[in-house]
């Protein structure tokens, strides 16, 4: 080991990285785009949704009342519904098919009459089920709106019924008015669901996506950077010179890895700070978290270097890394939680070292699992990283020998 | 003392044999040129010496010792392609290579001054001549006893070329040894104490430029410039070089009118005629039957 040569390579690489515009893009701008995209899509909790509904209203009192309520419901200052009235069902369905409304609500002609005579009022709702996710969101919002309206009606109705109950009835059966109200309520709604929210237990979305962004760095930037920078030195002829100098291959690879690690660390710090700035929340890794990050980075760099040395072409390396990384981006639990992934994809997240590393990082730093419990998983990642590093050095030595 | 002694050196690239048994001796303190056309094997030979490129058989001694990582430290090497990093400044490039070779920091300042290098400029902003000087400075960082240059002035304009030759001569005057590869016969002729003529992986002649020219014997060279036709009718060996031909003849007084008559009859318009001493290129043509370029 020659510390001066290692330092020389490290400093030279960092200077080159700092002055290379494309690298600045891949290392800094690209990750920020990801954080923005993922954070914006799924990360920010309770981002307001507005549902476009079409309504066909024959003009009765109750249906008009409900329509008015719909127009005015707000959540955190945003209207929950954007209501458009249609003269008849067919024009409303047309709009639904075109996608200009998310659902069509039809109040049949007898709706008002039924309600006012104490019968059940039926409402027909049309959905477009082409997009299952959209359907789930839209239908659950509309359902919960109508169940709220229903509850309101029920209470009015109950008051009316109470007025008809003769006074002596209470004495005969030794029941209070309160108690009867409770019985009525229970018979209409035997089970009540009460919603409560907890903070922190599952981790806010953005914390999940900050770790996801670290994973993306491993899949793309880290994997590509060292491999392509070694290829560049081969093509330029500088690697021949370095190989002919008293510097050993280990000095060279250590210098290069350190410069990559520093660049990646800076890029991760930028992403973390950016998430804090834009989404108001972020995740700063614990010391154990950093240990996982560096171990996974070694795996990723080694894999990239091995690919680069075996193909010896920058183009093929980029192609292979993308080919490997693109599917893994979605299947290795990096941007999509393993819990919502299809059954067949789960082993990938579990066994692919970068997927496992990210899982450990999340368990430790988002869900607060004690480090001791995670040692097994961490060892798995560590062993893979060491094996990969040995393979990478072997392929590097092989490539140097073949260099003519 | 021989600075370099090479015996029976062979090197294959796959099925192709680039060096077919090269023998060479370079004396300490001389400028020695490898002269040959592209593809002769000059770069291959140099890379074996300076970069540790593997070879198949043969023997190489540097100042009497086996070529190795240690003895290679006696050799400074300026490759044909620049090895400076474009995005680094002149000084930063020198610092990087100084770190690799564990050369002293003071040496960097000395070299910057010696070659009047603009230390704050990025390598990519340097002209061809200055880039070559930077590469020369890199090769001299650890004060080698032998300097090897591959096509040192290819691509340079005439003034930069002359300046570069001056630098190389100064180096020799300090008692160092220079081995350079070139396909410019002027370069070998002007600069070299001794020349090895290389062709197709072999050294076909070695000697001082004067000795080599004696290989041509009593012959002279007639050069004729112009729009030339009917070349196939000339009864003497010649080579074409752009709008000029060089004809090798024993008796120029007899041959000249003969040749001119043939050319003019064929419809040539002759602009200039000279009778010259033979050059190394003529030697090469005589030895191989083809030109250098
Ligand atoms: N890395 C290589 N792989 C395969 N063939 C090569 C390689 N380098 C040179 N050659 C071949 O070897 C021959 C000699 O090349 P080179 O040593 O570069 O000659 P010169 O420097 O005299 O022009 C050429 O025919 C060239 O094509
Ligand atoms: Mg060459």
Image (cartoon, coloured by chain):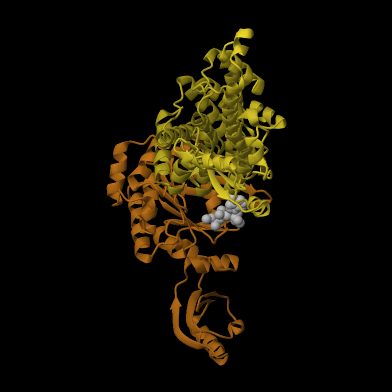
Relative to A368, residue B135 above or below: below
Q: Between B12 and B238, which is closer to the camera in this rendering?
A: B12
Residue B62 shows up from this direction:
no
Chain A image colour:
yellow
Q: Is residue A129 left or right of residue A360?
A: right
Residue ID at (48%, 87%): B270
Q: Quadrant of ligand 1?
A: bottom right
Give the colour in which the image draws chain B: orange
Expressed as whole percent of the image width and height from the top left, the position of residue A235 reads: 53, 48
Among the 4 quarters of the image, the one containing residue A317: top right
Q: x, y percentage for residue B244?
A: 49, 78
Whether residue B231 is visible, yes or no, is yes
Q: B146 and B164: which one is in front?
A: B164
Residue A225: image location, x then y, percent: 51, 40
Q: How many marks?
A: 0
The percent coordinates of residue A75 (x first, y second) are 48, 35
User: Quick check: B210 above or below A109?
Assistant: below
Q: Residue at x 54, y 16 (%)?
A: A369
Residue located at (65% from left, 32% from top): A118
The quarter of the picture where residue A171 lies is: top right
Q: Nearer the viewer, residue B105 or B265?
A: B105
State the residue lying farthest toward the right: A344
* Of residues A322 and A262, the one drawn nearer to the viewer in this rendering: A322
User: Picture quarter containing residue B236?
Assistant: bottom right
């Amino acid at each position: 080991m020659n510390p001066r040569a290692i330092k020389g390579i490290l400093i030279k690489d960092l200077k080159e990285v700092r002055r290379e515009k494309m690298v600045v893009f891949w290392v800094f701008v690209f990750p920020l785009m990801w954080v923005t995209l993922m954070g914006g899509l799924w990360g920010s909790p309770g981002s307001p949704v507005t549902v476009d509904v079409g309504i066909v209203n024959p003009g009765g009192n109750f249906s008009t009342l409900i329509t008015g309520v719909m127009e005015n419901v707000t959540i955190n200052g945003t209207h929950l519904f954007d209501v458009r009235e249609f003269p008849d069902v067919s024009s409303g369905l047309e709009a639904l098919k075109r996608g200009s409304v998310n659902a069509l609500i039809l109040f049949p002609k007898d709706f008002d009459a039924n309600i006012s005579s104490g019968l059940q009022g039926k409402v027909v709702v049309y959905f477009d089920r082409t997009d299952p996710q959209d359907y789930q969101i839209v239908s659950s919002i509309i359902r919960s709106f109508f169940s709220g309206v229903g509850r309101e009606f029920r209470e009015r109705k109950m008051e009316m019924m109470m007025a008809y109950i003769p006074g002596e009835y209470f004495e005969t059966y030794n029941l209070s008015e309160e108690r009867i109200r409770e019985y009525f309520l229970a018979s209409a709604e035997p089970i009540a669901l009460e919603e409560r929210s907890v903070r922190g237990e599952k981790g806010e979305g953005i914390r999940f996506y900050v770790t996801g962004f670290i994973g993306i760095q491993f899949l793309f930037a880290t994997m590509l950077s060292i491999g392509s920078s070694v290829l560049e030195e081969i093509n330029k002829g500088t690697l021949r010179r370095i190989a002919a100098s008293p510097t050993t291959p280990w000095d060279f690879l250590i210098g290069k890895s350190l410069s990559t690690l520093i660049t990646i660390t800076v890029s991760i710090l930028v992403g973390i700070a950016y998430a804090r700035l834009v989404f108001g929340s972020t995740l700063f890794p614990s010391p154990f978290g950093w240990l996982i990050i560096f171990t996974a980075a070694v795996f990723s760099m080694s894999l990239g270097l091995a690919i680069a040395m075996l193909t010896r072409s920058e183009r093929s390396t980029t192609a292979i890394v993308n080919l490997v990384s693109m599917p893994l981006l979605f299947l290795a639990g990096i941007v999509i939680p393993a819990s919502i992934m299809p059954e067949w994809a789960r082993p990938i997240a579990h066994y692919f070292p970068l997927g496992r590393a990210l899982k450990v990082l999340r368990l430790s730093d988002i869900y607060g699992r004690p480090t001791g419990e995670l040692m097994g998983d961490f060892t798995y990642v560590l062993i893979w990283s060491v094996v990969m590093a040995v393979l990478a050095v072997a392929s590097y030595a092989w490539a140097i020998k073949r260099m003519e | 003392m021989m600075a370099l002694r090479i015996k029976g050196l062979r090197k294959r690239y796959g099925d192709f044999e680039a060096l077919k048994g090269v023998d060479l001796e370079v004396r300490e303190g001389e400028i020695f040129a490898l002269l040959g056309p592209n593809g002769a094997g000059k770069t291959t030979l140099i890379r074996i010496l300076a970069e540790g490129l593997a070879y198949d058989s043969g023997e190489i001694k540097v100042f009497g010792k086996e070529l190795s990582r240690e003895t290679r430290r006696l050799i400074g090497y300026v490759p044909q392609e620049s090895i400076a990093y474009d995005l680094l400044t002149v000084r930063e490039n020198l610092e990087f290579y100084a770190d690799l070779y564990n050369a002293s920091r003071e040496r960097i300042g000395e070299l910057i001054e010696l070659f009047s290098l603009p230390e704050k400029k990025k390598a990519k902003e340097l002209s061809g001549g200055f880039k070559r000087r930077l590469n020369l400075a890199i090769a001299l960082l650890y004060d080698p006893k032998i300097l090897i240059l591959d096509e040192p002035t290819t691509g340079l304009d005439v003034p930069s070329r002359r300046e570069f030759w001056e630098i190389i001569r100064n180096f020799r005057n300090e008692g160092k040894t220079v081995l350079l590869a070139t396909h410019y016969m002027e370069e070998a002729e002007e600069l070299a104490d001794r020349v090895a003529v290389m062709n197709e992986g072999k050294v076909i002649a070695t000697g001082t430029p004067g000795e080599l020219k004696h290989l041509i014997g009593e012959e002279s060279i007639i050069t004729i410039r112009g729009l030339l036709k009917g070349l196939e009718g000339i009864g003497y060996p010649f080579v074409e070089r752009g709008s000029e031909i060089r004809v090798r003849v024993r008796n120029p007084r007899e041959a000249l009118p003969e040749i001119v008559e043939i050319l003019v009859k064929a419809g040539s318009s002759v602009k200039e005629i000279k009778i010259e001493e033979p050059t190394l290129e003529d030697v090469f043509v005589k030895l191989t039957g083809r030109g250098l370029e």
